[in-house]
Image (spheres, helix red, strand yellow):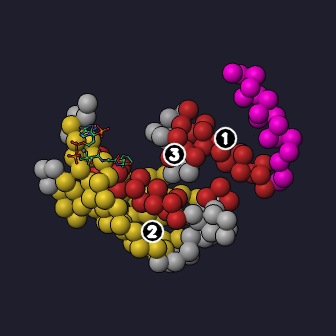
Amino acid sequence: MNNQVKELFEECLASSSPEELAILETVLRGFQKKQKNINSSYIGGLLHMERKIKEEYCELTVPISPLLHNSLGIVHGGITATIIDSAMGTLANSILPDGFGAVTSQLNIHYLSVGKGDYLQCKAHIDHKGTKTMVISADVHRSDGKKIAKASGSFFIIRKK
Ligand SMILES: CC(C)(COP(=O)(O)OP(=O)(O)OC[C@H]1O[C@@H](n2cnc3c(N)ncnc32)[C@H](O)[C@@H]1OP(=O)(O)O)[C@@H](O)C(=O)NCCC(=O)NCCSC(=O)Cc1ccccc1
């Protein structure tokens, strides 16, 4: 297994352009962030997510690199959705007592403008917290200040198994 990974790594390294090398570095540094527990998930590490949580509010920032681009060279809409779901999910789970978790049951996103620039920042806040469901809204802005997405999500509160 070790040798297989080494061979694959060396093969990728040998055939990479300068841009691909930069992407490989982004991926490896992200993997390392999960290994070192700087991020709690591989997705968070690979996207180099940084988050601040205050009561009923979460701010999540992701630097833009070609790793996040679609074939048009702008941020992939699924990546924006991941950023939104992560900010909302982190917020929902942060306010629950031990033994409970929250999962996304519905996510609605309006994509208002293209994702480009240095970073995307998502700000999520709680609109409603019930005993079984939560409703959370979020806005995503890019580094030049333009709003690129507006979202609302429903979360279902589960008892952790
Ligand atoms: C739970 C519910 C929303 C409602 O369930 P109901 O409509 O009442 O239906 P029913 O009770 O029949 O169960 C149906 C299925 O649900 C399963 N299940 C039920 N209760 C529990 C439980 N306590 N624990 C575990 N599983 C439970 C159950 O086993 C069954 O599975 P099966 O079919 O047998 O394999 C369900 O529709 C669902 O799980 N949807 C998907 C949600 C999802 O995956 N969202 C995306 C990921 S979240 C995210 O990423 C946000 C985030 C970001 C960052 C950080 C953190 C978070």
Element at badge 3? Answer: helix
Q: Residue at x 76, y 28 (%)?
A: 6
Q: Mark 2 — residue?
A: 140
Q: Nearer the viewer, residue 24 or 76?
A: 76
Element at badge 1? Answer: helix
The x and y percentages for residue 77 are 52, 65
Q: Nearer the viewer, residue 110 or 42?
A: 110
Q: In this view, does 32 lie to the left or right of 58?
A: right
* Label 1 crowd bin: few (<14), some (14–19), many (20+), radius 10 Å: few
Question: Assess mark 2: CB under 8 A from ligand 1?
Answer: no
Looking at the rendering, the stretch of residues picked out in magenta corresponds to 1-18
Does the image show residue 56?
Answer: no
Q: Residue at x 50, y 35 (%)?
A: 37
Q: Mark 3 — residue?
A: 43
* Label 3 crowd bin: few (<14), some (14–19), many (20+), radius 10 Å: some
Kind of residue at disc 2: Val
State which tag comes first along the sequence, 2 or 1. 1
Q: In this view, does 2 lie to the left or right of 145?
A: right
* Label 2 crowd bin: few (<14), some (14–19), many (20+), radius 10 Å: many
The x and y percentages for residue 94 are 29, 46
Element at badge 2? Answer: strand
The x and y percentages for residue 138 are 36, 66
Report the Cα–Cα distance between label 3 and label 2.
18 Å
Q: Mark 1 — residue?
A: 28
Kind of residue at disc 1: Leu
State which tag comes first along the sequence, 3 or 2. 3
State which tag comes first along the sequence, 3 or 1. 1
Q: Does the magenta stretch include residue 3?
A: yes
Kind of residue at disc 3: Ile
Query: What quarter of the picture does the C terminus occupy?
Result: top left
Majority SS type along the magenta span: helix
